[in-house]
Amino acid sequence: MDVVIVTANGMVKRTAADEFRAQGRGGGGITAMGVAAGDHVVGAVALKNEQAIMVVTAGGTAIKFEAAELRTMGRGAQGVRSIRLKEGDKVAAVLAL
């Protein structure tokens, strides 16, 4: 099982779920993704290699791709661009299919 994280500027990253250790009460958390200044995380989904991912923008554009097309990266990585955004558009949602 992997975790896919997507930002408003269209960056996407896939990380093995095993890289996220359980936190106890009062834990400080861990870095899940390097996010550029002015960007923020829109969503995260858990998925298996045989599933697909759909990224949808606020302007109504959507792109679907197979999870296997997205290589696994470490927790601190910024990821890769998932969709070319039109000026002023942002990612609104991510879905595991």
Image (cartoon, rainbow, N blue to C red):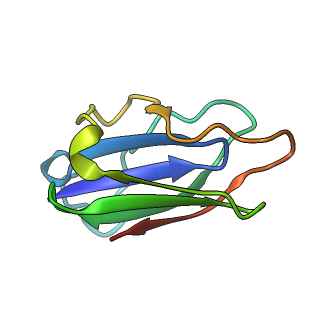
Image point 38% across, 31% down: which residue? 76
Image point 75% across, 37% down: which residue? 38
Q: Does any portion of residue 31 appear in the rendered image?
A: no
* 54 to the left or right of 45: right
Image point 25% across, 34% down: which residue? 71
Residue 10, placed above or below residue 27: above
The answer to which of 11 and 50 lies nearer the viewer is 50
Image quadrant holding the N terminus, namely: bottom left
* 31 to the left or right of 68: right
Report which quarter residue 25 is drawn in.
Answer: bottom left
Image quadrant holding the C terminus, namely: bottom left
The answer to which of 26 and 77 lies nearer the viewer is 77
Q: Where is residue 94 in the image (x, y as percent from the top left)?
A: 50, 63
Number of numbered callouts drawn: 0
The answer to which of 71 and 42 lies nearer the viewer is 71
Report which quarter residue 95 is drawn in.
Answer: bottom left
Image point 79% across, 49% down: which residue? 89
Residue 60, placed above or below residue 89: below
Q: Which residue lies furthest to the right in this view?
A: 88
Q: Where is residue 61 in the image (x, y as percent from the top left)?
A: 67, 58
* 18 to the left or right of 54: left
Q: Position of residue 73 (x, y in %)?
A: 27, 32
